[in-house]
Image: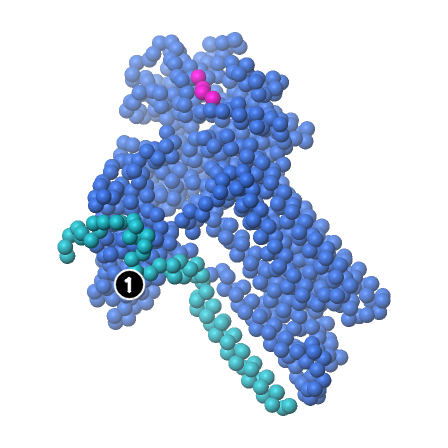
Chain colours: A cyan, B blue
């Protein structure tokens, strides 16, 4: 049963490691902005269906060739 | 002219969505309101960034200005703005006020496509900041700022903004994290006890586990529960009491008792319950903070109350929303208007009343080139100012909201929740002690402690405290969407209890910007008329505005010694002549007003003692005034107080009892009337135009200002209704009543939960953890009731709340 003692102490250390990581994450500001990422994941670079509907034609004519 | 009608006629700019009023530029089949917007559109198209216009509808920011950033070319100054710099990469953080929707985030995080020198950019939406990493060998800070400016996201560069303030939530996250960590571990150590396991080596484990628990509980008590103790101690020192007192007593009792069991009786104690309890308490608190923040954010960022101001552009004067005002804009401020932003005085002198800000009622005299601070109210002739600092909507909202600094404000009304919670704490404490003593009497010390602590914890009034602000906060949001802006939640509560409505006539029931004007007497020569027109332009009185609009255009004259006497008239010295405009007896003492002919809608002209004649203004009633009265009559007692003579008596008699029609009332009489009704225990709503009846608005239970445009912002009122929405008044009243019913329902839910919880707790049937879990659940159910309920009533009375593309 003495193995229990060792296991408990080890588990406490592991858990404390996680707690320390959490405290560090909070202090370094990783939780500060929780709203922007929720918008960031909504778009991609691919041409969206909406855009195709919106600009049905003549979009490819670039105004000034560069 | 109201803003909206003009906007509906004009084409909308593809980039910024503003109506193309001044000019219309068409390019590539799209419409633009100015060159700036067209330019931004072309830049984005060129770089394949036109998806910007798909993320949100017309998301752009209007770009009408060209700013100079020459000072950024200086190396040392530019470096002082940087957050980080090495051989290759620089990092800088800009505050960009224009960030307002999801498309802004999208575009600002695509900056690397616009210039290869930019490595990455990240937006923090709530703070309106963007952090940009760039290669300073390819791109200087000056060029970077120019680039941002070219797409209309001009950074607001201020040196003192360099330090960033961390989120205020960091503390509670850490508290929750630590409490959660200890809670989990303590439960593991207590498992043998939960299951009554005797298989373990008793000597060792039963000793070690409790001691580990005792050790782990210390940071929870010292750090996580700290704020409860602080708050409780603070109020006890003032010989007051709040809900943190019983919670703190409960926590300390549990802690001491558990230590007693562990170290004296070699038991396990309740420390697992204690950390669990604090963990759930904090979760509830966090949830509550988030809810309040959400409501506040709504109010500030979405500019709950769309203030507009008069901006001077060249020779034109335009009404602009406050949020679109930038530094160096020129604003015109009229008598009795609020200074919307810190600015420099351009006119010669001004007298400004800062009573809203400082409580000092004597006006301060400011000279040309002096700085005037936002929140003051102009007394006397109109002035021109140059904006120095971006106006802050939230600051003005605060002024409107802050009861303590309003001179002659209403006596602070105690909200229903305050009244209840005052008794609540005392009752809870006595129940806890009675339960404790009863169990002692029965002879179970353990049960006595359990009952005592769980009573203290389970009776948390979180739900009680949430019901009012959340329900009424949502109600305020919905009302704002219908064009009715309420000062604060207390005002919504007051509105729901109204039983008497008093109307002012001029500008409230009649159009304040439309009227028929006829001149009677000898028309003065143009020179005098020019002076008269200038004089009328100084005043905000509805009659002045009407006659000003009616007179032909003249060049502006210089005026001195401007005076405006409420209810009488205005006078000033122009080109060496003393001009008086106003009531008959005001402009000329010789002219005795005989009561038959005196008409309050006559404005007399007197120049150097010679009376020329008068303007007859015939007001036009708003449409469907009859329907408004008909729908209000069954539920409310209606009265009308008017400054005019009783010409329209017969017309109004159809809806309002004759004994409730009062004419020829001075502002003081209106106030007296309201005080008299209040003395008879009536709850009075006064509807006026918010200008010459502010005393009456202040003394009423709910002062409603009805305005044509939102520039006439007067902190004296509790609510502002747009003139064209006056038909909505009966629905608004009904809605406020329903909203208050929801608050009561929230109280009932909270009480039911408390009664059930307490009855179990006094029998010592609840473990402290269960008590703590019940708390956030009750808070959540009250918030749910508030949101679902207000939405239901909004649909019933107004519309389907559409979630437009807003954040």
The subunit carrying tag 1 is B
Crowding at label 1, few (<14), some or many (≥20) Cα neighbours within 10 Å?
some
How far across and down, in percent of the image, does residue B717 sit?
A: 52, 35
Q: Disc 1 on helix, strand or loop?
A: helix
Q: Nearer the viewer, residue B475 or A25?
A: B475
Give the residue displayed 81% in from the left and 65% down from the top: B439
Asked if residue B47 is among those painted magenta in the image, a careful observer would answer: no
Residue at the far bottom in the pictured view: A2
Q: Is B392 left or right of B729, judged from the image as shown?
A: left
Give the quadrant of the N terminus of chain B: top left
Residue B530 picture quarter: top left
Q: Is B66 left or right of B454, judged from the image as shown?
A: left
Image label count = 1
How far across and down, in percent of the image, does residue B667 sit?
A: 54, 24
Q: Nearer the viewer, residue B421 or B391?
A: B421
Determine whether B642 is above or below B149 in the image: above
Q: Is B507 left or right of B685, judged from the image as shown?
A: left
How far across and down, in percent of the image, does residue B122 sit?
A: 35, 62
Q: Is B320 left or right of B759, judged from the image as shown?
A: left
Q: Nearer the viewer, residue A55 or B338?
A: A55
Give the residue displayed 37% in from the left and 32% down from the top: B5
Determine whether B51 is above or below B437 in the image: above
Residue B242 picture quarter: bottom right
User: Which residue in the structure is indicated by mark 1?
Assistant: B79
Give the residue displayed 85% in from the left and 67% down from the top: B442
Give the residue displayed 40% in from the left and 56% down from the top: B125
- Write the start and end of the magenta stretch as one range: B618-622
How far across and down, in percent of the image, does residue B55 sit?
A: 34, 53
Determine whether B227 is above or below B595 in the image: below
Main secondary structure found in the magenta portion: strand
Determine whether B594 is above or below B618 in the image: above
């Amino acid at each position: 049963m003495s193995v229990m003692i060792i296991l408990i102490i080890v588990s406490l250390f592991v858990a404390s490691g996680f707690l320390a990581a959490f405290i560090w994450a909070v202090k370094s500001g990783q939780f500060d902005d929780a709203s922007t990422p929720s918008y960031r994941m909504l778009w991609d670079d691919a041409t969206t269906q909406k855009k195709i509907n919106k600009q049905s034609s003549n979009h490819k004519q670039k105004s000034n060739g560069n | 002219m109201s803003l909206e009608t003009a906007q509906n006629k004009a084409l909308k700019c593809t980039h910024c969505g503003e109506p193309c009023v001044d000019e219309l530029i068409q390019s590539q089949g799209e419409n633009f309101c100015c060159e700036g917007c067209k330019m931004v559109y072309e830049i984005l198209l060129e770089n394949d960034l036109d998806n910007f216009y798909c993320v949100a509808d017309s998301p752009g920011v209007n770009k009408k200005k060209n700013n100079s950033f020459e000072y950024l070319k200086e190396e040392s100054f530019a470096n002082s703005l940087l957050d980080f710099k090495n051989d290759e990469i620089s990092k800088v953080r800009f505050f960009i006020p224009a960030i307002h929707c999801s498309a802004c985030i999208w575009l600002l995080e695509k900056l690397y496509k616009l210039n290869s020198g930019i490595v990455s950019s990240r937006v923090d939406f709530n703070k309106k900041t963007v952090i940009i990493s760039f290669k300073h060998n390819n791109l200087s800070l000056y060029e970077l700022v120019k680039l941002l400016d070219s797409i209309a996201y001009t950074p607001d560069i201020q040196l003192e903004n360099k330090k960033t303030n961390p989120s205020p939530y960091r503390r509670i996250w850490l508290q929750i994290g630590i409490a959660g960590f200890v809670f989990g571990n303590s439960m593991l150590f207590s498992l043998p006890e939960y299951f009554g396991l005797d298989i373990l080596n008793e000597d060792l484990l039963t000793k070690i586990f409790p001691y580990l628990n005792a050790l782990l509980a210390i940071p929870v008590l010292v750090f996580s529960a700290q704020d409860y103790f602080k708050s409780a101690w603070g109020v006890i020192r003032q010989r007051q009491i709040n809900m943190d007192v019983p919670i703190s007593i409960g926590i300390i009792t549990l802690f001491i008792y558990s230590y007693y069991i562990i170290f004296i009786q070699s038991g396990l104690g309740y420390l697992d319950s204690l950390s669990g309890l604090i963990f759930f308490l904090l979760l509830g608190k966090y949830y509550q903070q988030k809810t309040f923040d959400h409501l506040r954010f709504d109010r500030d960022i979405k500019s709950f109350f769309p203030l507009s101001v008069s901006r001077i552009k060249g020779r034109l004067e335009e009404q602009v929303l406050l949020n679109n005002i930038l530094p160096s804009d020129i604003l015109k401020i009229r008598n009795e208007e609020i200074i919307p932003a810190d600015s420099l005085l351009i006119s010669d002198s001004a007298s400004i009343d800062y009573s809203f800000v400082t409580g000092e009622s004597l006006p301060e005299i400011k000279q040309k080139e002096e700085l005037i601070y936002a929140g003051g109210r102009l007394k006397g002739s109109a002035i021109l100012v140059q904006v120095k600092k971006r106006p802050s909507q939230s600051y003005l909202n605060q002024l409107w909201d802050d009861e303590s600094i309003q001179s002659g404000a209403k006596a602070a009304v105690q909200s229903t929740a305050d009244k209840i919670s005052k008794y609540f704490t005392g009752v809870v404490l006595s129940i806890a002690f009675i339960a404790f003593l009863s169990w002692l009497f029965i002879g179970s010390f353990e049960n006595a402690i359990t009952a005592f602590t769980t009573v203290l914890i389970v009776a948390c009034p979180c739900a009680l405290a949430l019901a009012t602000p959340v329900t009424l906060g949502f109600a305020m949001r919905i009302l704002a969407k219908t064009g009715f802006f309420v000062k604060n939640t207390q005002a919504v509560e007051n509105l729901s209890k109204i039983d008497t409505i008093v109307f002012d006539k001029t500008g409230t029931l009649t159009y304040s910007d439309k009227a028929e004007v006829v001149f009677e007497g000898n028309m003065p020569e143009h020179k005098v008329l020019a002076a008269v027109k200038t004089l009328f332009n100084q005043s905000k009185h509805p009659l002045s505005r009407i006659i000003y609009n009616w007179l032909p255009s003249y060049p502006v004259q210089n005026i001195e010694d401007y005076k405006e006497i409420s209810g009488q008239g205005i006078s000033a010295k122009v080109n060496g002549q003393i001009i008086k405009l106003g009531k008959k007896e005001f402009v000329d003492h010789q002219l005795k007003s005989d009561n038959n002919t005196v008409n309050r809608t006559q404005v007399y002209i007197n120049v150097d003692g010679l009376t020329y004649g008068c303007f007859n203004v015939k007001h036009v009633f708003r449409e469907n005034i009859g329907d408004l009265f008909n729908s209000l009559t069954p539920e409310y007692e209606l009265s009308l107080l008017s400054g005019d003579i009783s010409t329209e008596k017969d017309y109004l008699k159809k809806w309002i009892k004759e004994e409730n029609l009062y004419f020829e009332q001075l502002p003081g009489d209106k106030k007296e009337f309201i005080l008299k009704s209040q003395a008879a225990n009536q709850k009075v709503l006064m509807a006026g135009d918010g200008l010459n009846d502010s005393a009456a608005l202040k003394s009423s239970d709910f002062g409603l200002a009805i305005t044509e445009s939102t520039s006439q912002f007067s902190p004296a009122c509790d609510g502002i209704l747009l003139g064209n929405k006056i038909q909505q008044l009966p629905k608004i009243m009904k809605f406020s009543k329903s909203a208050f019913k929801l608050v009561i329902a929230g109280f009932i839910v909270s009480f039911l939960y408390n009664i059930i919880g307490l009855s179990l707790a006094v029998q010592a049937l609840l473990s402290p953890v269960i008590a703590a879990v019940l708390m956030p659940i009750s808070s959540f159910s009250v918030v749910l009731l508030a949101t679902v309920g207000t939405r239901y009533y909004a649909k019933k009375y107004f519309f389907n709340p559409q979630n437009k593309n807003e954040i």
